[in-house]
């Protein structure tokens, strides 16, 4: 379905139906067809032709006046709206100038959006704490939560405090730890090193099978004999 | 004493000490006991070696000591030499694990980790080529026994009995 064009004369044309009926009631079908076609063309061209019917011209002028009136009204509305916005901005800037020190203090607790989709809201203090928890992996953690909120609309409402979700022990933290471990495993595999489990098992076997103490004891005994 | 016999004696002795070492380390690892340095470890091995329990049943002795902890309502912890001695003396394991049975210096077939010890592998090599198994002899015990007899005879002679 096509959208109707706004502020065009086509929207405003309203024929006086009774007058139109008076005009066309005596016409036969052929004349009526010609009349309608002519009227349609005239309306499209702005009724500038010399042989345009007076009735059609009158209707057109009335509609045109109506359209202009509406356009002016809308222009006034738009101007007012712009003015109001500018006024608000200037008022806000004045307020900021007045309470500049207070704003510096309140900005500390102000939450700013982070992440690719800008969904994760954190204050500077929370960010500092999380940096201590995650270190260089904070960006990954934020991206995980950000993607989750992006894909689950309800999550945005569910989580009141995003810093609390990112804290140690929560699901995001566990996911990041898993990723780190996975990365370490991949790195070890690429270097051709043993897996953690195998290395641990080998170490344990070496510890249990170490017979250096026993060998020394046997040597001492054989010497004594 | 031929060379083979002396080799088997040495290996059986080494196996016993290695088994004790393995079991002590395993117990420390399993029950998060205190790690021992070399001197303490050799002392522990020596003291456990003095317990008259055959090599085969040593693991059972350790298990029984833990069962004893459980029976007494103690927290699970690594066994001490005192626990082992007490179990040997007062619990039923003591009757079962004295060195009287043939081949009791070898660990059980099911006890795979103990059968991977270097001394056992060496013993296995010897026994595989033998039609009749030669039992190891505790040379030290024989010498001590002979010494005791000599002392007794010498004492009787000097006293004129």
Image (tube, coloured by chain):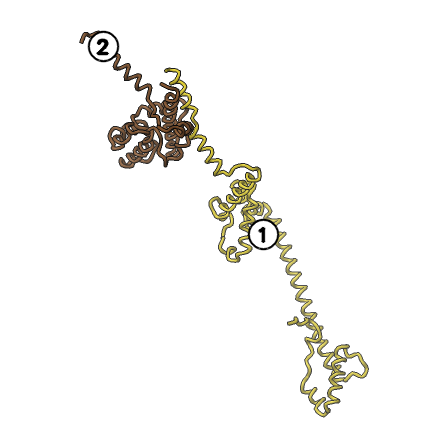
Chain colours: A yellow, B brown
The crowd level at tag 1 (other Cα within 10 Å; few <14, some 14-19, many 20+) is: some
Of the 4 image quadrants, the one containing the N terminus of chain B is top left
Indicate the chain on which mark 2 is placed.
Answer: B
Residue B145 lies in quadrant: top left
Q: Is residue A181 left or right of residue B82?
A: right
Count the marks.
2
* SS state under label 2: helix
Observer-nearest of A82 and B5: B5
- Residue B87: x %, y % from top left: 27, 30
Q: Is residue B53 above or below residue A186?
A: above
Q: Which residue carries the number 1 mark?
A: A118
Residue furthest front in the image: B131
- Residue A54: x %, y % from top left: 76, 84
> Are dots 1 and 2 in contact, CB under 8 Å?
no
Q: Which residue carries the number 2 mark?
A: B155
Q: Is residue A225 above or below residue A172?
A: above
- Residue A148: x %, y % from top left: 53, 53
Q: Is residue B102 above or below residue A221?
A: below
Q: Is residue B40 visible?
A: no
Task: For marks 1 and 2, give the CA distance.
Answer: 100 Å
């Amino acid at each position: 379905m096509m959208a109707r064009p706004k502020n065009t004369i086509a929207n405003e044309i309203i024929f006086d139906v009774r007058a139109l009926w008076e005009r066309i009631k005596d016409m036969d079908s052929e004349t009526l067809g010609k009349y309608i076609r002519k009227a349609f063309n005239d309306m499209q061209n702005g009724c500038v032709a010399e042989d345009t019917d007076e009735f059609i011209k009158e209707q057109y002028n009335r509609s045109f006046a109506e359209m202009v009136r509406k356009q002016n009204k809308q222009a006034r509305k738009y101007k007012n709206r712009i003015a109001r916005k500018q006024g608000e901005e200037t008022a806000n800037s004045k307020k900021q100038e007045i309470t500049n020190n207070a704003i510096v203090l309140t900005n500390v607790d102000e939450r700013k959006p982070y992440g690719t989709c800008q969904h994760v809201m954190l204050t500077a203090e929370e960010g500092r704490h999380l940096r201590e928890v995650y270190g260089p992996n904070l960006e990954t953690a934020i991206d995980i939560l950000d993607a989750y909120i992006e894909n689950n609309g309800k999550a945005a409402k569910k989580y009141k405090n995003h810093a609390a979700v990112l804290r140690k022990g929560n699901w995001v933290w566990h996911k990041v730890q898993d990723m780190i471990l996975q990365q370490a495993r991949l790195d070890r595999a690429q270097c051709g090193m043993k897996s953690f489990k195998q290395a641990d098992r080998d170490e344990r076997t070496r510890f249990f099978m170490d017979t250096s103490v026993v060998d020394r004891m046997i040597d001492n005994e054989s010497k004594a004999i | 004493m031929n060379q083979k016999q002396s080799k088997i004696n040495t290996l059986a002795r080494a196996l016993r000490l290695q088994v004790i070492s393995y079991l002590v380390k395993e117990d420390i690892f399993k029950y998060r006991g205190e790690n021992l340095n070399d001197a303490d470890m050799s002392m522990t091995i020596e003291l456990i070696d003095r317990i008259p329990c055959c090599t085969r049943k040593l693991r059972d002795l350790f298990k029984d000591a833990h069962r004893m902890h459980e029976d007494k309502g103690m927290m699970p912890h690594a066994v001490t030499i005192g626990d082992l001695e007490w179990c040997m003396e007062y619990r039923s394991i003591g009757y079962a694990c004295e060195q009287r049975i043939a081949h009791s210096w070898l660990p059980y077939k099911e006890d795979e980790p103990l059968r991977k010890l270097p001394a056992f592998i060496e013993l296995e090599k010897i026994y595989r080529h033998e039609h009749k198994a030669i039992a190891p002899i505790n040379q030290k015990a024989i010498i001590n026994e002979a010494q005791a007899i000599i002392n007794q005879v010498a004492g009787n002679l000097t006293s004129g009995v």
